[in-house]
Amino acid sequence: MDHARFDKSLYLPTSREEMDKLGWDQADIILFSGDAYVDHPSFGAAVIGRVLQAHGYKVAIVPQPNWRDDLRDFKKLGKPRLFFGVSPGAMDSMVNHYTAARRMRHDDAYTPGGRHGARPDYPSIVYSEILKKLYPDVPVIGGGIECSLRRVSHYDYWSDRLRPSILADSKLDMIVYGMGERTIVELADRLAAGEKINDIKDVKQTVFFSSDTPDPNKDIILASFEECQKDKSKQAANFKSVEIESNRMHGSRMWQSTRGRMICINPMLPQMTPEEIDASFDLPYTRYPHPRYKGKEIPAYNMIRHSVNMHRGCFGGCAFCTISAHQGKFIASRSKESILREVKQVTCMDDFKGYISDLGGPSANMFGMKGKDQTKCSKCVRPSCLHPNVCPNLNTDHSALLEIYKAVDKIPAVKKSFVGSGVRYDLAMAHSEDQKVNETNRRYLHELIANHVSGRLKVAPEHTSDRVLDIMRKPSFELFRRFKTIFDKVNREEGLNQQLIPYFISSHPGCQEEDMAELAVITKGLDFHLEQVQDFTPTPMTVATEIYYTGVHPYTGKKIYTPKTEKEKAAQRQFFFWYKPEGREQIIRTLHHLHRQDLIKQLYPGGVAGYNTYRREPMKKYPSSNSGRNKDASSKSNNRRNKR
């Protein structure tokens, strides 16, 4: 291993002392981040810092500054030559801080030791206000997931109100939304050339206040923030326009009047080319947390330290997901060579034991995929390439993934490579007119299940009701049944005892108590004891959140019921855990109220005695290979994997 690669001097500086050692009087750009500084391509501040560094700029990072004391963290590096960059971190701060029930979380996965309280609510607002007070003449540019998803008026679940673009609620001069490498370099170059931040108006993926006049023939003029406050249907219409433009290959510029000023939103850039995305991932990351943390564990880093992200973007378009709004609908895939270079870097890490934890991406099996005819894609406004059916123009061939898996497993230091990201089984099972593609995809599923599952394979059917799934933009549950049949068959053939771990959501728009009761019966029949479950949490810039707030579907205008009170949510959530004795009586009362005595008999066929017997001896009636109780695969399965 090249130990020089992990020398402290190769980290971006985080203190005045580190800057002095580099001989810097002043940084060109100083980045403030709500996350700890982990020099890894999965952490946004590190990526932006490394990209700017590669273009010749002196970049420093201030991770998790203290905003409650004398503000010394905001002063210690002084004034940058060009601008301050502000990012709340890899997660929206409010999702990071609060549960779906709006209760405070007690930990933070992006902080050393998992300690809570290292960042404020809405860091983009707090950090920018402090920086503008201290350095009023220095541009402050916001980026990251928080700014990206709050770039227009949006419903904020935690304050339970419509909020304007975060640009209007903060002291930011400009927002860079989406994946920001190309945009931030262009901004840095233009500021370095002497342009003023307020004069830069034509850079894509930027949001800013403008005194210019929109062009009604080319631009989209959204309903004003004030109009949306008065009329929720206008907010719903706004969202539809924003989602469509975000998912277009070549979108239009959008404008929204907010508090008497016009906010301009320039369109997204086309997806990165393999050469461009390789250039970002191939930068000299140390792949470790900064030495300032003195070995304290950072939970989010521990999860991904031996993983490799192969692509960006997602064309699934799920109604509750924000990936396409931030990363785009079109897939940007790395080259095979770049991926293998990173795998080899992982194998050189001090704690590497031979196992790649994830060869994945936002959705594990979209690598290398795009439309067969790109001219059709350039005109397409579908938010999903998979719903309501798989687009006939989509090339669903999984052969590129099979090549990557094979090449990675040939690397001598790799004992095993796993897929830890969620798999879109509907994509792998989609029928193609090309029989070679169908055969390749069958081989992919077999290879995935037989050789790349670390005991448990995560998939996300999300619900069992086709009506709810349609609102979610997910496939019929019948497809999950078919996939489970394939999964079980491969396990039998290969002598494995792996678990299929399905994810489900309760309280999603359109979901009724009766739907959850039927979910309980269906999943019981499939021998699942659910553990990967959650209440729907409204987050900015998703279809589901707009339905939650406005009460109507933004594409159809139809009213849709959404459970909102804690009582309504608890009534749905209880069905996930039908097998727990303490919840049985309440579930039975609920089912009597719903006049679904038939479901009572299916959940508890033996009454009290039968239920207690099942609880005492579950293996006799319900084999638990997929129950989720056993965290590890059997010794037979593990031995088989180790021999491969």
Image (cartoon, rainbow, N blue to C red):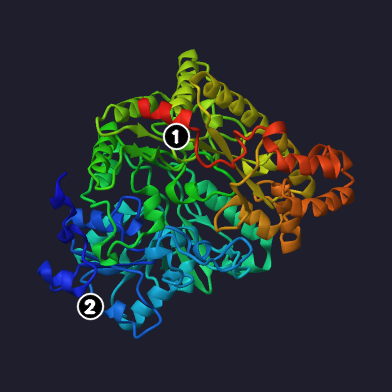
Quadrant housing residue 16? bottom left
Residue 560 can be seen, yes or no: no
Which residue is located at x 83 percent, y 42 percent? 609
Which residue is located at x 75 percent, y 58 percent? 568
Q: Secondary structure under badge 1?
A: loop
580, 417: nearer the viewer: 580
Viewport quadrant of the N terminus: top left
Which residue is located at x 45 percent, y 47 percent? 251
- Amino acid tagged 1: Met
85, 532: nearer the viewer: 532
Image x and y of residue 227, in percent: 63, 67
Number of residues whose C-alpha sits closer than 10 Å to that of mark 1, classed few (under 14), some (14–19) or many (20 or more): many
Q: Is residue 414 left or right of residue 248?
A: left
Q: Which residue is mark 1?
A: 366
Residue 135, compared with residue 350, is above or below; it is: below
- Amino acid tagged 2: Gly
Image x and y of residue 635, in percent: 47, 32
| Residue that extends furthest to the bottom in the rendered view of this protein | 70
Image x and y of residue 155, in percent: 60, 63
Residue 482 can be seen, yes or no: yes
Q: Is residue 346 left or right of residue 54?
A: right
> What is the CA distance from the residue labelled 2 to the residue labelled 1?
44 Å
